[in-house]
């Protein structure tokens, strides 16, 4: 394995030059393929940071610090039980992260024309925010965790949402860390069986 890692590391310079060349040529499709290959290879050789940075390049955004720490420790998270009522589902591994709008057009269409998740008709602010969120989880009870880059603190943290079709309002947290600490407190107190 050590020899394979050495070969991988020795080829990083060539890969970097190739990515810069594709960027200068504005060949975004080919650049995306090279970044995707690097992401997969980096994670396979134990270089999780390459995988995280490649995901950021693919998404076109710098992920917030507390969420990156979560990914470094877990690379996603499965719920403690196979079914947890009213939860946000399992957290995606970094390679599967994507914008909410990519996988959930039907949710966005359902909320088009409302100002917030409570269904108040008004300006398009809520649905525009929803379109721009990053989906962190899947498989929940019509509920997901999302990161909202439109609300970013000076510390680089993004607002974190718990969004459920059955809830009248989005539950908003200042950061991913605050959401996780809140959910852990609820779990430890016996108020929930998962996230």
Image (cartoon, rainbow, N blue to C red):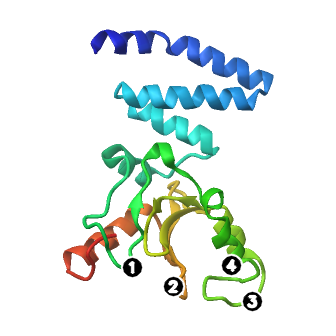
Using the image as rendered, state which of residue 13 and residue 106 is in the foreground. Answer: 106
- Left or right? Give the position of 63 relative to 186: right
Mark in front: 3 vs 1: 1
Q: Quadrant of the C terminus?
A: bottom left
Report if the CB atoms under discs 3 and 2 are less than 8 Å apart.
Answer: no
Q: Earlier in the sequence, mark 2 or mark 4?
A: 4
Say above or below: 147 vs 75.
below
Using the image as rendered, state which of residue 118 and residue 142 is in the foreground. Answer: 142
Say above or below: 151 vs 102.
below
Q: Give the CA separation, mark 1 to mark 2.
A: 9 Å
Q: Earlier in the sequence, mark 3 or mark 1?
A: 1
Tell me where residue 50 appears, x and y as whole percent: 46, 31
Q: Give the CA separation, mark 3 to mark 2.
A: 18 Å
Question: In the image, what residue occupies the spot 57% across and 11% down?
Answer: 14
Could you tell me which secondary element the residue under label 1 belongs to?
loop
On the image, numbered disc 4 is attached to which residue? 111
On the image, numbered disc 2 is attached to which residue? 166
Farthest front residue in view = 82
**Circle 2 crowding by C-alpha within 10 Å: few under 14, some 14–19, many from 20:** few
- Left or right? Give the position of 11 relative to 32: left
Q: Earlier in the sequence, mark 1 or mark 2?
A: 1
On the image, numbered disc 3 is attached to which residue? 121
On the image, numbered disc 1 is attached to which residue? 86
């Amino acid at each position: 394995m050590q020899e394979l890692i050495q070969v991988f590391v020795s080829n990083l310079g060539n890969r970097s030059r190739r990515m810069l060349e594709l960027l200068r040529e504005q060949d975004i499709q080919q650049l995306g393929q090279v970044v995707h290959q690097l992401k997969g290879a980096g994670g396979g050789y134990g270089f999780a940071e390459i995988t995280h940075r490649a995901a950021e390049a693919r998404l076109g955004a710098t992920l917030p610090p507390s969420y990156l720490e979560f990914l470094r420790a877990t690379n996603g998270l499965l719920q403690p039980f196979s079914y947890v009522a009213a939860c946000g589902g399992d957290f995606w591994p970094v390679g599967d992260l994507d914008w909410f709008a990519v996988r959930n057009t039907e949710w966005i269409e359902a909320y088009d024309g409302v100002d917030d998740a409570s269904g108040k008709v008004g300006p398009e602010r809520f649905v525009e925010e929803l379109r721009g969120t990053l989906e962190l989880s899947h498989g929940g009870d019509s509920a997901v965790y999302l990161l909202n880059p439109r609300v970013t603190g000076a510390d680089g943290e993004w607002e974190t949402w718990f969004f459920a079709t059955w809830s009248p309002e989005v539950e908003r947290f200042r950061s991913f860390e605050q959401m996780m600490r809140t959910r852990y407190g609820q779990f430890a107190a016996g108020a929930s069986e998962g996230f």
